[in-house]
Structure formats: C-alpha cells, structure tokens
Amino acid sequence: MATMKQNTPRSRKVSIRGKSRSTEKASPAQSNRAGRPASPLITRDAAAEAALSIVDEKGLDGLSLQAVAQKMGVRAPSLYYHFRDKEELLVKVSRLLLKKISSERDTWSDDWEARTKELALATYRVTMRHPNAAPIALRFFPRAVVQPAYERTLASCPYKPEHHIVVLEAIERFTFGYTIFAAAAASLHTPATPTPDPETYPFLAQALKVAPGSDEEIFTEALQVILDGLRVRYGKG
C-alpha cells in the first residue's frame, strides 16, 4: 500500500524592518526553563514536610532554616518570605502532625466511644512514627485549630454537658501524656520502663513480666480503663 507523504509544518521567518524573527512557538518545557518554574519551589506545607523529615533524621538540634532550605534545594533567605523565624515553622510542623493524625484513617466510626479509641490510637501511631517531633506537638499544640474537632466530639458525647470538659481533659491528657513519654523513650532508643532488678523490685518485675506485650497494647488497654470508668461514674446521658 502506498503511503502518503505528510507535509511537515515548518517555521517561517517574518521580516520586520529589516530584521527577521521566527514564528515557531517555544514548547512549554522551553518556556518553563526560560522563565519561572511551572510550580513554586517553596510552599508552607512543603517546608513543614522537609522540616519534619530533618527532625526524624537528626532530631530537633539538627533543625534550622538553613537545613530546611538545603533539603528543599532553595536558598535560606527564600524561606523568610513564608516564615518569620524557626518558631513559626515549628508551629506549622505541629499542624502537619495533626493533619497526619486526621488522615490516619479513611473513615471513622459513628459510635462515640469507638471513634474516641480510633482517634487516640491514631495519635499514638503517628507520634511514634515521628518520636523526635513529639516535643513540637507538646510545645506548639494548636488548641484553637482543634476546636472544630472538640465540637464534633462533644456533639455526639453520651454524657451530660457538665461532664464534657472532664471527659475531654481525661482522654486528651492521657493520650498525649502517654504518647509523649513513649516517644521520648523511642527517640533515645531506650525502653519506656527500664528492666528492674527482680530481687530489689520483685512486684515491679513480675508486673512487667505478665503485662501486655507492646506499648501500643498497654496504651489501648489503659484507654479502655478510662472509658469504662467514665461509663461507671457518669452513666449515659
């Protein structure tokens, strides 16, 4: 079968006052190389992710705006267009951790107690994946940002309004308190509770011997004890 020869469009030159120019248009890639990048190199979210990665690798002492800039492949002064100082960057990192907690599950239970356990466990797991960053969450905990979450929790809380703050504080302080201590031990690569001398501390040694097998199991069981206690003390409605 004979093939038809296609006419290939050619660039042509147009003369303007004795000068010639090509009418061939530059490709998008050529335009991007010549001008600004297709997407900004720096965003607040990207900087927070880079900062968290550095903290994971080197700890808080290894974090600086210079280190973040190097991680992102930009110059440090450029970060000051987005963050006044390192502290403002740490605030953004703390919010990033909360975002990771909220996206830990695709769906959350409708039942209040089940959802409370899911959220607490998500907090524990995310923090333990970033143990070096736990002090950031503690220092820069954005209570104003989590007010919508508090509101959703209380909207379906089965207890009377006069008990709501106690319920919130009991669950939140246990969750973050336990998690911060566990993360601190993990960041130092030490056990949460050192192995005691069984002759000096026989009861403690026995308790540790028969305790649940992992810190996460202990966390889950301790949280269940709190939830059971709330039901006994306050009942429903």
Image: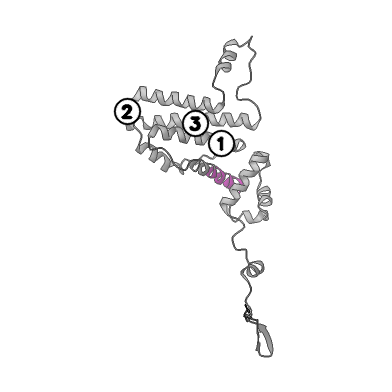
Magenta residues span 84-96
Secondary structure state at the residue bearing disc 1? helix
Name the chief secondary structure element in magenta.
Answer: helix
Q: How many marks?
A: 3
Q: Distance between the Cα atoms at labels 2 and 1?
A: 32 Å
Which numbered disc flags the more N-terminal residue, 3 or 2?
Answer: 3
Going by the numbered disc 1, the residue's amino acid type is Thr
Q: Is residue 226 left or right of residue 93?
A: left
Q: Is residue 99 left or right of residue 189?
A: left
Name the spot of residue 131 as percent of width and height, x first.
60, 35
Q: Is residue 111 left or right of residue 199?
A: left
Which numbered disc flags the more N-terminal residue, 3 or 1?
Answer: 1
Q: Which of the labelled discs sits on residue 236, or is there none?
A: 2
Q: Which of the labelled discs sits on residue 232, or is there none?
A: none
Residue at x-position 46% and y-position 36%: 119
Q: Which residue is mark 1?
A: 127
Residue at x-position 58% and y-position 44%: 90
Q: Residues within 10 Å of mark 2 (few under 14, many from 20)?
A: few
Q: Residues within 10 Å of mark 1 (few under 14, many from 20)?
A: many
Going by the numbered disc 2, the residue's amino acid type is Lys
Q: Which residue is mark 3?
A: 175
